[in-house]
Image (cartoon, helix red, strand yellow):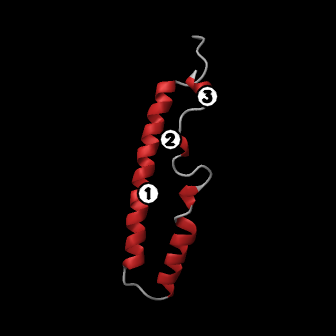
Amino acid sequence: MNGFWGADTEALRTMGTVCSRRAEALADLETLLTSTIDNIEWIGEDADRFRADWSGIVRPLPAGPGGRTAPARAPPRPARR
């Protein structure tokens, strides 16, 4: 055993950068999809149900505790030592 305890700080920073970029890509995709869903000519019960599911179930999912960018934040203090 090499005596190293903890995470690789540089790897955590890299992972944070990747997570941040992916969160931005998801936000862009969400904006595009929402615009498309809101502006498409589609009427009826299926359209109403889909729009309700999109705005009430699907869109809120990634916005859980800490939001989409929670993993991208700085590593916890002990990891920076």
Residue at image point 45% right, 50% down: 23
Q: Amino acid at mark 3?
A: Arg
Q: Nearer the viewer, residue 77 or 48?
A: 77
| Disc 2 to disc 3, C-alpha distance | 14 Å
Q: Amino acid at mark 2?
A: Ala
- Considering only order in the chain, which callout, 1 or 3, is on the residue closer to the N terminus? 1
What residue did someone put label 3 on?
Answer: 77
Seen in the picture, residue 27 relative to 39 is either above or below; the reply is above
* Quadrant where the C terminus is found in the figure: top right
Give the image location of residue 19, x and y in percent.
46, 43
**1 left or right of 12?**
right
- Considering only order in the chain, which callout, 3 or 2, is on the residue closer to the N terminus? 2
- Location of residue 37 (image quadrant): bottom left
Foreground mark, 2 or 3, reads: 3
Residue at image point 39% right, 52% down: 25
Secondary structure at badge 2 equals helix
What residue did someone put label 2 on?
Answer: 72
- Location of residue 75 (image quadrant): top right
What residue did someone put label 1 on?
Answer: 27
**29 left or right of 74?**
left
| Disc 1 to disc 2, C-alpha distance | 14 Å
Give the image location of residue 70, x and y in percent.
55, 45
Seen in the picture, residue 61 relative to 68 is either above or below; the reply is below
